Amino acid sequence: MSSPYTSRRLRAVAAPVALALGGALTAGGAFGSAPTAPARAAVQDDAEVEALLEKELSSLDGLDGTQIWRSASKTFGLVGDQFGASFDAVVARRLADGPDDPRALLYLATMALEGDDPEHARIAEALLPLVRSRDAGLARAGVDLVGRMALEISDRDVKKDCAEALLARARMGSSDVGLRVAAAVGTQALGTGSQIAAARRVLGEFLDSADPTVRAAGALGFAEVGTIEEVEGVEDELERLSQLPGEEGVLARAHLRTLSESRFFDSRIRQLQRSQVGERSIGSNLPPDHAQLEELIDLIQQAHLDGAEASRDELFEGAMQGMLSILDRHSSYFSSESYKKFEQDLEGEYGGIGAYVQTDPDDNLFTITRPIYSGPAYRAGLATDDKIIRIDDWPTVGETTEEIIKRLKGRPGTNVRLYIWRSGMDAALIERPTEDMAVEIKRAQISIPAVQAELLPGDVGLVELSSFGRNAARDVRNALLEVQERTESGQLTGVILDLRNNTGGLLGQARDVADLFLPKDLVVVKTESRVLEKQTLKTRRSPIVPMDTPMVVLINRYSASASEIVSGALQDHDRAVLVGKRSFGKGSVQRLIPMPGALEDEFDDENRNGRYDNWENLRTDHDGDGEFDHAPRVKLTIERYRLPLGRSIHREIDAEGSVTSPGGIPVDVEVATARREPSVLREMRRIQQTRVLREWAQAEYDKDSATLADLAYCDYDDPSLYPGFDALYAGLDTFLTEDDVRFLLRIEVRRRVQDARGNAFPFGDFGEDLQLQAALESILDRSARTVASIDAYARTFDARPEEGAEDDLASLALGVSRERMERAMALIAEAEARPLDDAAAEELRRILGDLRRSTAKPR
């Protein structure tokens, strides 16, 4: 997402080259001479990121708001793109901690806004203490920053909270008049109707003041929000001010000039509209409001700066979206093209080769990221990372992903000839493939799998459901039966249903999935509507999983809609323990309604599935484009659902805009996901991009597939189990720990093994996934077993940090003596004063490396 603030990539080009930090790191990472050559940016690694920020924060005393902004802007220019993400992460973390010093708060917020992808809502919330500050200068800076972000903040609750804080400042009689005006202006940019009205009353009081200075401030405030003509007395006051010298006179003259130009433009527009009306057919039967919409579209296309670039259809779609958006965030308009994509995602079926694909950013070649293991591409021998460089006689290099996919799809039973290039082959073959690279594939009806399942140690069944498409319940049922058959006893010890990141789907499928785990005739969900009869959806058959089998449902903040119905119903009936994070909070039901009067192409439904497939014959093609066009649809919220105990999971907001219910499904056991430091993640991505680990996994699988299959299932967090790991690790030349590299290697091994076995691993990996580990602990507790009783769990489960727990320096330094820690601190202090020599720099690197390795998991 682009930012209205200057990007780091542009700023870094003109930034100062060197920073006065003693011992700035060289490009190689060791401490050396301070940089002087203009060939590199001043900030080169994570140590300098932290040092730079700490130095700047300690030098803010006595600075006013403008000086702090200049300091932040200068610092920002020193951070090049390579370490920009790391710097942004450090700034965001410091800002989230809520610094007590208001100057530090302003500095950090300014830096955060300068970043590549600022989170405006969070930054605005962080600035609210500054808005309330007793220091008028700092408060003014906070008010200005929050007000300027109005267009960037989409969260209505955040905007309302910010407007409330600004309004309180505007009403504060003891505050500086300029500060109160700025706060009132910001309130009007962010606030609701009642807040805007209150802010205008404040400005109105200023405008009515007998004090000319206060009256001028009120008039300029109204002018800034564009209400000169709406409020009596504003234009007269601006005329008075325009005769005076100074800043207020300049502002008044600018506002009056803008008003004059606006009036001239309005006059020209009215002339244009009159000429358009004259050209329209006499006796048009369009209703007045419809005619106004047509006139507005004409006006935009003729007068807007970019009007010539907007098609009539695009403007009409925007009007439809605008109408629906004021109702709720889930109602929307689907054009013919957008509905086509929506339907395919929902149905999960199409005619094609069966593979997940994308253009690889590393080589710009069209790549299979993973075959669908039930599809023809996999049966023909295609695998992850295969490059499709030609389709029949048509080269794919340089073509768009959409066009390539279109050529891969087709009528089931028809053949397509693909030319495949693999890593290690001659690069010249990409442009001139040979016939021995060709693979003949017969297209088939492809069903995109929404379910992955695995039998975990201790006979616990894990079933991951990614969406509630038309076959969700059937696929979950089959997966449960399949993993149950693989148990020694024929019965599962427990079941884990993973609904993380599942954004929902069909309401009926939500009931049918819950039906698999609940007794017959229990309420799953109830619906309420203005136009439809109330419904109560109940289970219709006996569960396939015995009621005494312990069950856990995994959810997170991306679990929504149908996911929340299932997890909430199982929670209400005490059937399952919910683990993870509170869900999204979408408790409304939408229906897709064809636009009245819209035309839809007709086709021969050869397979009688009730929808168009891309190989079927068109009988009526209204626009003659040779493609099937759906009628546009409206997705309209017409129902709201409640859980069995009457709970609404929808985020509830009253008439005043206040949140009365946070929405979502609360979990019984809250567990956050594991996180790594930005510098570690960046290095992990670098290692992955080298493909060294992927090539190792391929080569080792070819030599010993059984060992790698075992490691893919469980590697006991032990790097030494991977053949030749020590040499592999040494060759990477990385600061990552052995466990970090083991984690990356495990990803590549699992990728290779699932290709070989023809069955994808679920998203959750019990060796690495803290939420899944908590779910397994819950299952075992209710089965009178312990983690220690199952070796795979005992050796892989990680300790979960307590919420808000502080890192203990002593525990972090485990394995590093106090003397060496003190020596490291002394070296760091010396580096701040002057460059370290090579020996001292190497000593410091060794100590820090030992410290990092000491915090890694033991072998």
Image: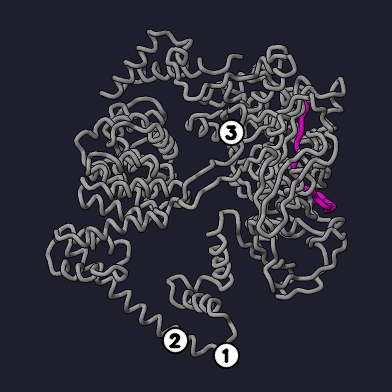
Rendering coords of residue 842 (x, y %): 40, 19
Give the quarter of the image for residue 43.
top left
Residue 703 in view, yes or no: no
Rendering coords of residue 334 (x, y %): 64, 62
| Residue at the (29%, 32%) spot, across then down | 101
Circles 3 and 1, Cβ within 8 Å, touching? The answer is no
Give the quarter of the image for residue 578.
top right
Under mark 1, the amino acid is Gly
Under mark 3, the amino acid is Lys
**Residue 471 in the figure: left or right of residue 182:** right
- Element type at mark 3: loop
Which residue is identified by label 2?
274
Rounded to the nearest whole Å, what is the CA distance between mark 3 and mark 1?
61 Å
Per the rendering, the mark at residue 581 is 3
Per the rendering, the mark at residue 154 is none
717 versus 815 height, above or below: below
| Residue at the (85%, 56%) spot, across then down | 412
Query: Of 568 and 694, which appears nearest the observer?
Result: 568
* Residue furthest to the left: 245
| Residue at the (37%, 30%) spot, across then down | 50
Q: Give the range drawn in magenta.
A: 434-455
**Residue 552 in the figure: left or right of residue 414:** left
Judge depth for marks 3 and 1 and give the one in front.
1
Badge 3, how many Cα within 10 Å: few under 14, some, many 20+? many
Judge depth for marks 2 and 1 and give the one in front.
1
